Amino acid sequence: MANRLVSVLSLAAAIAVVLPASAIPAASAAARALARKALAKGDHASVVAAFDAALPSLKSPADRVFVLQTVASLEERTGNPAAALERYTAAASATSVRDDALFLDAARCALALNALPAAESLVRSGLQTSFDGATNLRARVYSAWIQRGAGNRSESLSLIRSFASNPA
């Protein structure tokens, strides 16, 4: 179990480095150092507690988004989609600029919880406001997943066929 947690924590640390620049706002060096220090704690509870303790002291919205997204990613990858849903939603709303990709991350967690109405609400809001092709494609995939989860097999297949033949 300890080796698995160390592997997951290592993965979470790498996420902050590997995700595209648009996925994580430009965080300060101090926020990145905070993340490295928190992730070095080793066990899940200590890592999350370190992030939670540091969050109120962060002044920059970009730093808050960075920390919230990092913790959300960790929570999701360690099998806690409910906590990840909360963190992604908070990260998406942490700045004055709406981040549809983070709302879709929250929708993915809602889908993992089988909270279809919550997932549908998050996806619909993204579809209504996003002009980014990749984000729209993701929202359409999640829409098909929601339809399939709700038992609407034919509608989900229709959605999949429509965007397979007409990519965003």
Image: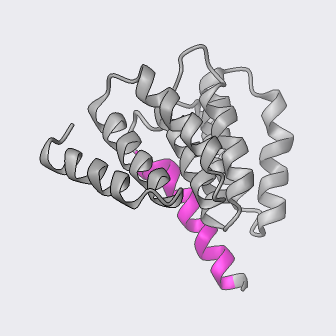
Q: Is residue 11 magenta?
A: yes
Residue 99, horizontal then vertical, whole percent: 51, 27
> What is the magenta range?
3-19
Q: Quadrant of the C terminus?
A: top left
Principal secondary structure, stretch drawn in magenta = helix
Q: Is residue 37 magenta?
A: no
96 or 13: which is nearer to us?
96
In the rendered image of this protein, does residue 34 appear above or below residue 41? Answer: above
Residue for point 68% across, 75% down: 5
In the rendered image of this protein, does residue 78 appear above or below residue 107? Answer: below
Residue 119, horizontal then vertical, whole percent: 58, 44
Q: Quadrant of residue 132?
A: top left
Residue for point 50% across, 58% down: 14
Residue for point 64% across, 42% down: 118
Residue 137, horizontal then vertical, whole percent: 31, 41
Q: Is residue 36 left or right of residue 82?
A: left
Q: Quadrant of residue 92?
A: top right
Q: Is residue 51 left or right of residue 151?
A: right
In the rendered image of this protein, does residue 90 appear above or below residue 59? Answer: below
Res. 25 in view:
no
Residue for point 36% across, 36% down: 135
Q: Quadrant of the N terminus?
A: bottom right
